[in-house]
Amino acid sequence: MSTSVAPLEMVDTDRYPLTDPGRPAWRETVGRTRAELAEAGCSVLADFIRPELHDLLRAECAALEPHAYTKIEKVNAYNTAIDEPLPEGHPGRTIMERGNAFVARDRIPPSSIIGRLYTSPLFRRFVADCFGLPELHELADPLSGLTLNVIAPGRAHPWHFDTNTHTVSMLTQAADDGGTFEYCPGIRSAADENFPAVRSVLGGDTRPVRRLALRPGDLQLFKGRFALHRVSTVKGGIARHSAIFAYSERPGVIGSAERTRQLFGRVLPAHLAERATRGDELLD
């Protein structure tokens, strides 16, 4: 693994000045990112990881793929029970197949590029500032927090809304074809679920859909609670890999045993503890 790469040497700090918080270059980068998040709910920081380390980034994460837990599920866009009674025409009645898999945090070496980045206080402060938050915390969950999402050829992560507000991810391996991140910014709001528009997209309407041409090493900041989004079906012979950096505005957050078992096929004592701080910052 990348034991020769110091904690922030993997980041292009000339473009993304993580080591100079509050200075003009930092404020310029953060301001631009905030503007993109306000306009579209999404901002991509291209080549956040230095290009000369892209091969290492890909190799480290590709080595983790055998540890991915896969559970093919029938889901709806709201991640609610598919047998829940809903009114005729409700978009939650549209059932899709979710085929993505997750590598848990305890399988990811702390010395890897994504391991070092996740635990970096400077990175965490930078991300919080980009989202306009006072601070962010690592999850206390031993399996979530930092994970690798794996979408094998022939599978997809279908249209859905996130339960958490802020998502931080990084493509580490692109598919041969397909595996495109697609989203509909602001299609719903806290005041209006806008069911007709959601139902239209689920039915094939592409007019509100934006597509991102993500590359390995790009950092993606995303507000997914109000943006319908998906990763299209992966084609070819190579899986799509992306690292997910989950943070919380509260310290000590641990996922529920039920949700953890669904994502990783197992639980640990921390998930069964009665006094654990539960949250919705787990993967969606």
Image: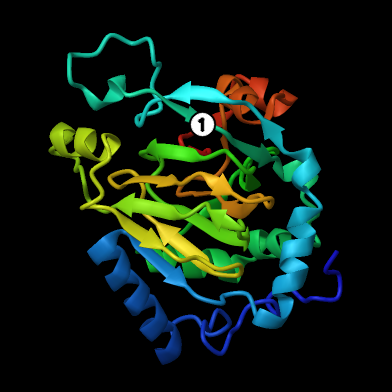
Q: Residue at horizontal 39%, vertical 40%?
A: 162
Q: Residue at x 56, y 77 (%)?
A: 47
**Residue 133 vertical placement versus 88 (above, below):** below
Question: Which quadrant does the N terminus fall into?
Answer: bottom right
Q: Is residue 197 shown above or below 256?
A: below
Does any portion of residue 278 appear in the rendered image?
yes
Relative placement, left or right, of 182 versus 152 is: left
Residue at the outermost front position: 236
Colour approach in the figure: rainbow
Left or right of residue 50: residue 283: left
Q: Amino acid at mark 1?
A: Arg
The image shows a total of numbered marks equal to: 1
Q: Which residue is mark 1?
A: 98
Residue 133 appears in the picture as rendered: no
- As drawn, is 234 to the left or to the right of 166? right
Instruction: Kindly indicate the quadrant of the structure image that contains residue 118.
Output: bottom right
Given residues 267 and 86, the one toward you in this image is 86
Residue under the point 49% across and 70% down: 126
Residue 270, percent from left and from top: 69, 28
Q: Is residue 176 above or below residue 232?
A: below
Measured from the top left, where is residue 68 in percent x and y? Answer: 72, 38
Residue, x 51% and y 31% (percent of image)?
98
The quarter of the picture where residue 273 lies is top right
**Residue 281 percent location from the top left of the image:** 48, 40
Helix, strand or loop at mark 1: strand
Tell me if mark 1 has few (under 14), some (14-19) or many (20+) residues whose alpha carbon lies within 10 angstroms of its own: some
Of residues 233 and 29, the one nearer the viewer is 233
